[in-house]
Structure formats: C-alpha cells, structure tokens
Amino acid sequence: MGTQEDIITFNHVTFKYNSDEPLALNDVSFGIPKGQWTSIVGHNGSGKSTIAKLMVGIEKPIDGSIKFYDQIINQQNLDNLRQHIGIVFQNPENQFVGSTVEFDVAFGLENNSVSYDDMQTIVPKALEDVEMLDRADYEPQALSGGQKQRVAIAGVLALDTDVIILDEATSMLDQLVEVN
Ligand SMILES: Nc1ncnc2c1ncn2[C@@H]1O[C@H](COP(=O)(O)OP(=O)(O)OP(=O)(O)O)[C@@H](O)[C@H]1O
Ligand SMILES: [Mg+2]
C-alpha cells in the first residue's frame, strides 16, 4: 500500500458552512489513490457532497489541508487545479449552460481553448460513450433525470481531466456506462 501514490489527500480537514452551525467535517484524513475508482459511502448529511466541494475548491477547510498530488490547494493554484479535476454534481440540472446537449458538452472545451476542429471529434465521442449521441440536438431541459446525468458525465469526460468526481451522479442510471 505504501508504494501507491495518492492523487488527492485530505489532512485533518475540518469544515463548517456557517459559524453558528455544527461541523460538517471534523478532522477528516484520507487519500485517494491514483489510477482507480474510489467510493465514499455515508448516510444523508454525513458530508459526502461537502468533501466533493472541498476537493474542487468551492469550499475551503477551516482547519487542515487538501493536496492535489503534493501541492496544497490554495487560492493561487485553484485555477490550475480546476484544469485537472472535473466534477458532476448531485443535481446536474444546475450544471447545464448550453442551449443544446451538444453545445453544453462543447462549452467546457471552449473554456479550455480547445480548437473547433478538436471539438468536432471530442464532443460526439463523449456523447457516444454515455449513449446520448442521438440526443445531441435536444435542449438539456427536455431530457429525463438519468439522461441529464449522462450528459453531465459526457461534459467531464470530454475535458479528459486527471480526476473525475461523481457526486451520486450515477444514482439515476440504470446501468453503468463503459468508458474507454
Ligand atoms: N450549503 C450549505 N449550507 C449550510 N449547510 C450545509 C450546506 N450544504 C450542506 N450542509 C450541511 O452539511 C452537512 C453535510 O452535508 P452534505 O451535503 O455534504 O451531505 P451528503 O453526505 O452529501 O448527504 P446526501 O447523501 O444527502 O447527499 C449536512 O448537515 C448539511 O445540512
Ligand atoms: Mg450529497
């Protein structure tokens, strides 16, 4: 085990949303090993989504630190971090920005200055991977819950990040999609 490299490390992380509320995370430490899927399991309200938000720097620990490889995440390296970590939130509805499925997947690529030519290949491939290519022209609002999750997953697959965080993003899927 000792030889395995962790890609994300939580080191005594403590967090609460508001000063007058109880701690959402209390002295939490763990490592996410590189090159495999890791699941975090816990009851409702136990802090899973909070952990996801801390991993991408949407929230900051009040105590302890979080590392991406050996770099402690801070305000200065946050933009760089977001190039490497993709996230699909629990409610993908809040995540759509494009007017169609296709534009939505392309949006993140545009943000990363991917060329139009490359997009022509990457977007259909990502939609095919989640079996949503036939819905490329649909408005995201016109999809079922599970289909929305698939499109949101396609959006992060397209970005080809080192890490993909799925916050119960597959809860509505009837089968897991094989990704190559
Ligand atoms: N935006 C917020 N503002 C204040 N408190 C919050 C906020 N989001 C979550 N919390 C609180 O933080 C705690 C952890 O919530 P979190 O959403 O991380 O749980 P979870 O494990 O993802 O739960 P679930 O399985 O229901 O998704 C809960 O007590 C919750 O009330
Ligand atoms: Mg949650």
Image (tube, rainbow, N blue to C red):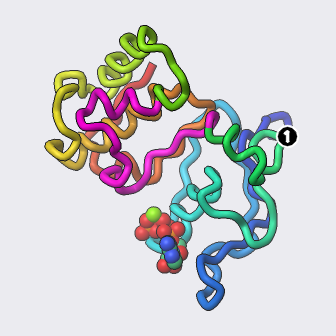
In terms of image quadrants, where is residue 132?
A: top left
Per the rendered image, the range of residues in magenta is 83-108
131 w.r.t. 77: above or below: above
177 sits to left or right of 145: right
| Residue 18 relative to residue 154: left or right | right
From this view, report whether residue 134 is shown above or below residue 30.
above
Nearest the eye: 106 or 178: 106
Label 1 amino acid? Gly
Image position, residue 144 (x, y; %): 17, 46
Q: Residue at x 35, y 50 (%)?
A: 92
Give the x, y percent position of residue 21: 59, 87
**Residue 104 is covered by the magenta coloring:** yes
Would you name the residue on which mark 1 appears? Answer: 2
The question of residue 73 being in magenta is answered with: no
Left or right of 166, for residue 26: right
Q: Position of residue 75 (x, y in %)?
A: 75, 53
Residue drawn at 18 percent across, 27 percent down: 137
Quick one: quadrant of the N terminus?
top right
Q: Quadrant of the C terminus?
A: top left
Helix, strand or loop under label 1 = loop
